[in-house]
């Protein structure tokens, strides 16, 4: 199970020939090829976006130069604003 033999491939082609006719098969093959190409392009773009996002996230976070007094005052201000 898994691989197609010559007989199965000929049978599938014959059924496609009967269903769609000789004039439609080249159009179907062309649209299938275009769909495959578009899918591969979309996958490549998604991988590039993921790599770019990962590379931008790997940089070390910047710590601001806030002293303890300013930080305590800011926390107090936010707590008061939250209670109001």
Image (cartoon, rainbow, N blue to C red):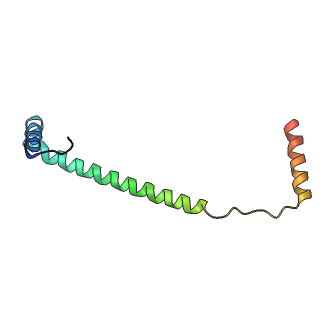
Image check: 29 left or right of 66?
Answer: left
- The quadrant where residue 84 appears: top right
Residue ID at (10%, 42%)? 13
Q: Residue at (87%, 51%) from the top-left corner? A: 74
Residue 5 sits in quarter = top left
Tell me what residue is drawn at x 17 percent, y 47 percent: 27
Q: Which of 22/36 is in front?
A: 36
Q: Position of residue 75 (x, y in %)?
A: 87, 48
Q: In which quarter of the image is the N terminus?
A: top left
Q: Residue furthest front?
A: 1
Percent across and percent down for residue 72 are 90, 52
Q: Could you tell me residue 65's position as x and y percent?
A: 82, 64
Q: Is residue 41 left or right of residue 16?
A: right
Image label count: 0
Asked whether, in this view, residue 84 is left or right of residue 45, the answer is right
């Amino acid at each position: 199970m898994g691989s197609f033999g010559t007989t199965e491939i000929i049978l599938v082609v014959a059924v496609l020939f009967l269903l769609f006719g000789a004039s439609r098969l080249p159009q179907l093959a062309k649209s299938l090829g275009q769909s495959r190409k578009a899918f591969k392009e979309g996958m490549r773009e998604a991988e590039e976006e993921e790599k770019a996002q990962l590379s931008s996230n790997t940089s070390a976070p910047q710590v601001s130069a806030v002293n303890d007094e300013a930080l305590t005052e800011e926390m107090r201000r936010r707590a008061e604003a939250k209670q109001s």
